Image: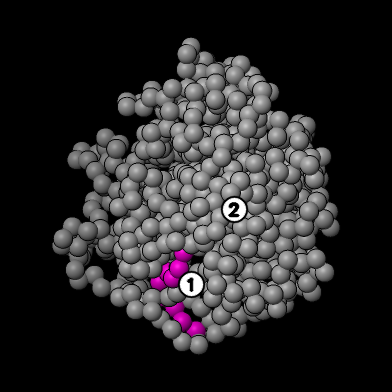
């Protein structure tokens, strides 16, 4: 039986009791415009919106608060100066715990954002321009985002683990003419050559930008190209820099998803709706109270870092911790040491990190004080109940509610989530829908699956919500195709789900083919494309397989060009190759050389078979009759067993 963990008694200042949830949820569905216009009042608008949602899903056309005007940076920073100018906006914990920590009050953050915004203006950045941000997890990464939103520029943050090729692709796709980077980053004691990667990206054919702003971090000696690269200090100034007045539907940022079906999609979010969604989800899901230290361990290169490192906390006048390092450096107790050091109240991380640390044992956790912790959260993939239990019982000492938050780059913020004092918890379930979210299950034909008992199907969302992505940058047809064509009239999430008889939602995984390695998602197609670029590789098929630490590992089936033979050396070379092409997160875990791939007669690779073999599960291969060469399966199994 699935267990239930009762929610703690609601504190007197909670934002949402069980009774309030029922009333508010019903109102958010029955009177969505009134509900969201009311929620929008938590922001400062230069022109208050009178319009709520104006949208259609067939074809998709989405707007919220369209007649409103505001600036997001003003709302995240300036507006708090009179009331909480001396309160901490950011705390910073460096990669090496023996080097100094740092903190910024709202007043100091304001000064820093103004300096960076002025630097961007001097560089030539104007309203509407796209700016690529390729930064380590340091305060300046968030400052760069805020500086862009201050002057109305559209940021495109590229995760610092991506390769020059990936940066180049993203720069070209959104026609970004400016880059903000640092000399180097630091992760787990190792330097990450960020500036050098940007240089390499800009050396690739067809990539050209007008200016690169370089933030000194490690002090490494990096070559600067005259007329192109500029040190931050040379362009920064304290001159007055007013916030640009933006329409609610002006673009705020572009963020590339992993791209399961070809090249990554530049998901576009706009200003007003995203701001309301970030503010509301942060406030209710974490039941945030002023003064609490909030720590989201995600990188700002992912949407989780956008919404819950930068925007959500600051829109609520909160204190957000930025951590440069990794969970296992200098040892496996680092997360808990950081929590003790900064008296973190709310900790938000991914199941893959929880599993990795659980494996090292509770003895790394217990020496560090966790009395400051009030609430724990997870995001990124389904959490297995065993890891949930460990997180709740050991890390949270059994007293902290755990919120499991299901959402996507495209949703801007939480969609299905436990609310900490309103909902009992079921380990492994993401809980119930957030306000305004109407999940819907459909079968393969698109027919809604209904009923009071347990139901399962493809997870769709029936109506728009303010934080919804508006398009794929420069390719609205792809937006339509990816999310609104499989089940016309509905937003299709790409995930499968089950809703139990109590109304709790269980995400069963993605319906398509994406691998999730340590919480970093990438399309199998991207890894395959990288592999076949190697001169010795003829064809590649990549599948995920269970991996104790990473959640999923990358398993690559490879056929070689005539005259080549698989060897350990070639395997090492291919690993290196993929690292260079995509980045270290895409490093193959297992390479399986084979003389052929199982294909249908029409030439499609049968991935379900490859997945089973990678999983060492040969009993349930299913129908193999449509294979062009059925004998191949036996050879593949033999190859797997001989590993
Ligand atoms: P792409 O759309 O290019 O394939 P992606 O889906 O991997 O990229 P994200 O938007 O970061 O990129 O991830 C969202 C997905 O992560 C969800 O669709 C779901 O599969 C998974 N996910 C996120 N949070 C949870 C959760 N709490 N429980 C279960 N799955 C989750
Ligand atoms: Mg997705």
Side (left or right) of 361 relative to 248: right
Percent position of residue 300, x then y: 58, 43
Disc 1 element: strand
| 3D distance between C-alphas at marks 1 and 2 | 29 Å
Left or right: residue 330 compared with residue 214? right
Q: Secondary structure at mark 2?
A: loop
Q: Position of residue 245 (x, y in %)?
A: 56, 40
Q: Horizontally, is 262 left or right of 104 in the view?
A: left
Query: Which of the marked residues, 1 or 2, is nearer the chain's N terminus?
Result: 2
**Residue most extreme to the bottom:** 452
Q: Decide whether residue 85 is among the magenta residues.
A: no
Q: Is residue 608 left or right of residue 132?
A: left
Provide the residue span drawn in magenta.
Answer: 454-464
Q: Nearer the viewer, residue 87 or 375?
A: 87
> Residue 403: x and y, percent?
65, 65
Quarter occupied by the N terminus: bottom right
- The circle on residue 48 is 2
Look at the picture and state if 570 lies above or below 23. Answer: above
Would you say residue 268 is visible in this rendering? Answer: yes
Query: Residue at the spot x=32%, y=61% of the render?
Result: 59
- Image quadrant of residue 239? top right
State the residue position of label 1.
Answer: 439
* Helix, strand or loop for the magenta stretch, by majority: strand
Residue 490, above or below 217: below
**Ligand 1 contact, mark 1 (Cβ < 8 Å):** no
Q: Residue shown at 58%/67% (left/top)?
A: 34
- Asked whether the beta carbons under mark 1 and mark 2 sit within 8 Å of each other, the answer is no
Confirm whether residue 330 shows in the render. no
The magenta stretch spans residue 461? yes
């Amino acid at each position: 039986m699935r267990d239930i963990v009762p929610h703690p008694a609601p504190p007197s200042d909670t934002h949402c009791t069980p009774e309030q949830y029922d009333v508010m949820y019903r109102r958010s569905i029955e009177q969505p415009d009134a509900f969201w216009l009311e929620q929008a009042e938590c922001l400062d608008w230069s022109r208050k919106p009178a319009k709520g949602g104006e949208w259609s899903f067939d074809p998709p056309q989405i707007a919220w608060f369209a007649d409103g005007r505001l600036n997001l940076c003003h709302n995240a920073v300036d507006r708090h100066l009179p009331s909480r100018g001396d309160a901490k906006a950011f705390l910073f914990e460096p990669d090496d715990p023996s080097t100094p920590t740092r903190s910024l009050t709202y007043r100091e953050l304001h000064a820093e954002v103004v300096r960076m915004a002025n630097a961007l203006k001097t560089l030539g950045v104007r309203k509407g321009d796209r700016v690529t941000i390729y930064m380590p997890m340091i305060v300046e990464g968030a400052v760069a985002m805020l500086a862009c939103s201050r002057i109305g520029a559209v940021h495109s943050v590229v995760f610092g683990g991506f390769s020059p090729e990936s940066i180049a692709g993203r720069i070209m796709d959104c026609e970004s003419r400016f880059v903000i980077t640092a000399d180097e980053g630091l992760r787990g004691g190792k330097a990450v050559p960020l500036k050098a990667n940007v240089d390499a990206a800009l050396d690739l054919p067809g990539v050209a930008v007008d200016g690169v702003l370089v933030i000194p971090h490690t002090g490494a000696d990096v070559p600067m190209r005259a007329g192109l690269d500029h040190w931050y200090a040379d362009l920064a100034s304290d001159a007055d820099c007013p916030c640009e007045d933006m329409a609610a539907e002006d673009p705020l940022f572009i963020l590339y998803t992993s791209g399961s079906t070809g090249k990554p999609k530049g998901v576009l979010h706009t200003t007003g709706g995203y701001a309301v969604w970030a503010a509301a989800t942060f406030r209710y899901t974490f039941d945030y109270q002023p003064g609490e230290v909030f720590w989201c361990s995600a990188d700002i290169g992912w949407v989780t870092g956008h919404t819950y490192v930068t925007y959500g906390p600051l829109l609520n006048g909160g204190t957000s911790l930025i951590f440069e390092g990794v969970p296992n450096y200098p040892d496996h107790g680092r997360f808990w040491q950081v929590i003790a050091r900064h008296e973190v109240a709310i900790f938000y991380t991914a199941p893959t990190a929880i599993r990795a640390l659980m494996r090292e044992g509770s003895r790394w956790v217990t020496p560090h004080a966790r009395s400051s912790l009030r609430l724990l959260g997870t995001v990124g993939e389904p959490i297995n109940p065993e890891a949930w239990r460990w997180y709740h019982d050991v890390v949270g000492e059994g007293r902290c509610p755990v919120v499991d938050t299901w959402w996507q780059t495209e949703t801007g913020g939480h969609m299905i989530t436990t609310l900490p004092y309103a909902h009992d918890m079921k380990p492994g379930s993401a809980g119930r829908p957030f306000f305004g979210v109407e999940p819907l299950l459909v079968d393969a034909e698109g027919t809604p699956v209904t009923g009071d008992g347990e139901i399962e199907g493809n997870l769709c969302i029936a109506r728009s919500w303010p934080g919804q992505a508006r398009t794929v940058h420069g390719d609205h047809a792809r937006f339509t195709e990816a999310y609104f064509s499989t089940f016309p009239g509905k937003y299709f999430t790409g995930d499968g789900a089950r809703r139990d008889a109590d109304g709790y939602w269980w995400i069963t995984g993605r319906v398509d083919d994406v691998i999730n390695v340590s919480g970093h998602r990438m399309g199998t197609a991207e890894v395959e494309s990288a592999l076949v670029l190697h001169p010795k590789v003829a064809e590649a098929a990549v599948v995920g397989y269970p991996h104790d630490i990473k959640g999923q590992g990358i398993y690559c089936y490879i056929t070689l060009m005539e005259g080549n033979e698989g060897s350990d050396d070639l395997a090492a070379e291919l690993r290196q190759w993929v690292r260079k092409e995509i980045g270290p997160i895409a490093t193959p875990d297992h390479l399986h050389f084979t003389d052929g791939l199982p294909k249908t007669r029409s030439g499609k690779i049968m991935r379900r078979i490859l997945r089973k073999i990678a999983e060492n599960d040969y009993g349930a291969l299913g129908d193999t009759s449509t294979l062009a060469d059925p004998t191949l399966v036996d050879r593949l199994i033999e190859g797997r067993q001989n590993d």
